[in-house]
Image (cartoon, rainbow, N blue to C red):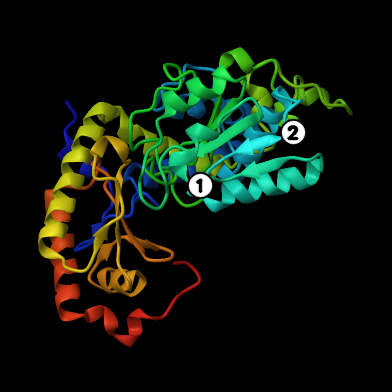
Amino acid sequence: MTDFSKTRAMFHIPEGMTYLNGNSLGPMPRGCEASIVNFLNDEWKTELIKGWNTKGWFTQTNTIGDRVGKLIGAPEGTTVLGDTLSIKVFQAVAAGLALVPDRRVILSDNGNFPTDLYMVEGLMNLKNDGYDLRTPDPLDVMAQIDETVAVVMLTEVDYRTGCKHDMAQIIAKAHSVGAIVVWDLAHSAGAVPVDVIAADADFAIGCTYKFLNGGPGAPAFIYVAERLHNDVEPALAGWHGHAAPFAFDLSYRPAENIERLRIGTPSIAAFSLLSAALDVWDHADMNDVRARSIELSELFIAEVEKRCAGVTLASPRNADQRGSHVSFEFEHGFACMQALIAEKVIGDFRAPNIMRFGIAPLFNDENDILRAVSKLEDILNNETWKEERFQQRGLVT
């Protein structure tokens, strides 16, 4: 049984702050300080370039990748780290299209995170071969999976509402018509139990700075089913994915395993932070995290609906159908969220009117939930959100 008081103590949460934004950027695990200092003083400073061998830097894409993979049910040797989630979208969709070369339809939904769609649009423009990106409403995706579809590309948990697709059901339907499926697990990894093997997933990608707490810009991951390893054609053929990277051949030969999905030199400093963040998961069970997430989310929804007039639940009411963030619609959602942040209750806003609150049991508890509701109630009752200072928008909202 996970001791959440123990995991909470493993994070830096500023005094007086209620942090309900781990779904966007997780707080800093305490172990990150020692880890980055160790990297600076005992690795980079002393080993310099020798560190690629003496400190295992070259293989950390794989060794830390396996640690992330464990959290999504992936066996060793099927997950690698590096680059950004946007790059991983490009890699996975391009590889998926190459596996089904006679089809031209990419199916997503209009609730997918925009960067995923942007990357696909860019890929389509590069290929210039008649591809069609379709984005129906999320609930209509299943009905549009047919023999014309090459790749289904979806984010399992909707970044706005937390609505969760049925991964196994969609994969089964896609495979029945010969399509490949790419899953974006940005709001799933560390938030809900994922089993890529049981679901028979083809590709899964995700970031590590949200529920995995790897820090701003932490490296992304890509999982590829082992059955596809030697068939995947890397569209981004970097030297770290070469079969013999230090032979320095002038022509690309892909590695025979998941390493062909590596691209170029990764940030070892970022790996040191992520490695320390993953240490927290050595003390947590994903099923316990999910059960606690549902308890806290249900409490939050019940208290908001009882005490906070004027806001409307945007997330699914059924806990089995949502991830680990809860969203409410409010006409003046941006200003209201700024007022909450001024009270040290940190959530975030998504256009046009959604206030998001991440529930991360590794560091959130009932006191966080009740304090957030009390502050929201006061702001709504007193109409504090109307103050001019809360109408000003920064570069990042």
**Disc assigned to residue 112:** 1
Q: Nearer the viewer, residue 15 or 100?
A: 100
Q: Decide: is 263 above or below 328.
A: above
Seen from the viewer's position, the closer of residues 315 and 338 is 315
Residue 358 locus on image (x, y percent): 30, 51
Is 183 on the left-hand or right-hand side of 188?
Answer: right
Is disc 2 in contact with disc 1, using a CB cutoff of under 8 Å?
A: no
Nearer mark to the viewer, of 2 and 1: 1
Nearer the observer, 269 or 239 = 239
Q: Secondary structure at mark 1?
A: loop
Residue located 70% across and 23% down the image: 99
Residue that mark 2 sits on? 235
Q: Is residue 356 left or right of residue 220?
A: left
Q: Is residue 190 left or right of residue 133?
A: left
Q: Residue furthest bottom?
A: 388
List the single residue furthest toward the top. Answer: 227
Residue nearer the viewer, 315 or 373: 315
Quadrant occupied by the C terminus: bottom left
Q: Amino acid at mark 2?
A: Ala
Q: Mark 1 is on which residue type?
A: Asn
